[in-house]
Amino acid sequence: MLDSIMHVLLVEDDPVLADGIARILRGHGMVVDMVNNGHDADRVLSSREVSVVVLDIGLPGIDGFEVVRRLRARGSALPVLLLTARDDIQDRVRGLEIGADDYLVKPFAAPELVARLKALVRRGNPRSADLQMGGLLLDPLSRRATVNGQVVDLSAREWAVLEYLIRNASRVVSKQQIIDAILPWGEEMTLNAVEVYVSRIRAKIMSAGVSINTIRGFGYMLEPVAIT
């Protein structure tokens, strides 16, 4: 995956809990895809790249333990956070022994879930370090952007587009590549919407010494402004 926008696979068969978790994570700028059974989780993890998995143990089909076992058997080091019941101590121990990275006991506080996921991704992903070009600085974990030391107000979609561009700096990326990178399954965005976001971002970072250049017929490229 070229981008490093935090992409969460949420595997939870309780629709109310799943929707609540998804809202929390999306509120922190994460892309969230959801499945509600172990077979679909295993299929997705075999074919798609994500940043981290939030995995309930008790699932229809194959359980969370088997999902983790198959994931590790494929050689994947993808971070896995298990969701467990309060009294299932043995389940927690078993989950860690077969390769899960952390667990969270239900019910849990939203800030703790977000903090644990960020810690897991940071631990396993050196690309979570600050991103800088010219006077533009992005902190992927806090989702804070500054231009010449001044905080820039970006919407969630503007942030996602800009992060993708800076992670692919000095290379051409198409509008469709941007859409595929920042949207979860099932959501749609028009190519014209990408143009709008890029235009807004340009206005906000114009003093940073970088430019989002339009490569006609291909897409966009973020690069330093040439000094003449």
Image: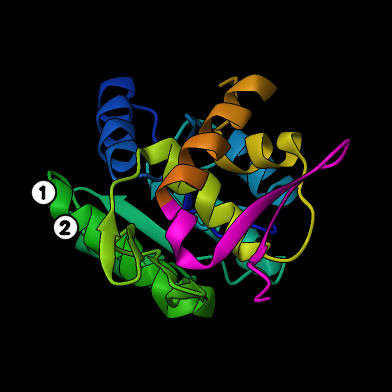
Horizontal and vertical percent for residue 118? Answer: 33, 64
Circle 2 Cα neighbour tier, 10 Å, few/some/many (<14 / 14–19 / ≥20)? few
Is residue 72 depicted above or below 211 in this figure? below
Q: Quadrant of the N terminus?
A: bottom right
Circle 1 Cα neighbour tier, 10 Å, few/some/many (<14 / 14–19 / ≥20)? few
The residue depicted at 45 percent of the width and 37 percent of the height is 157
- Along the line of sight, the residue nearer the viewer: 51 or 180: 180
Q: Which residues are magenta?
A: 205-228
- Along the line of sight, the residue nearer the viewer: 154 or 104: 154
Horizontal and vertical percent for residue 95? Answer: 39, 64
Are the two marked residues, 1 and 2, in contact with CB atoms closer than 8 angstroms? yes
Residue bearing the label numbered 1: 109
- Along the line of sight, the residue nearer the viewer: 59 or 150: 150
The residue depicted at 49 percent of the width and 77 percent of the height is 124
The amino acid at mark 2 is: Glu
**Disc number placed over residue 35 in the picture, else none:** none
The residue depicted at 56 percent of the width and 40 percent of the height is 182
- Along the line of sight, the residue nearer the viewer: 107 or 136: 136
The amino acid at mark 1 is: Ala
Residue bearing the label numbered 2: 112
Horizontal and vertical percent for residue 88? Answer: 21, 55
Q: SS class of the residue under badge 1?
A: loop
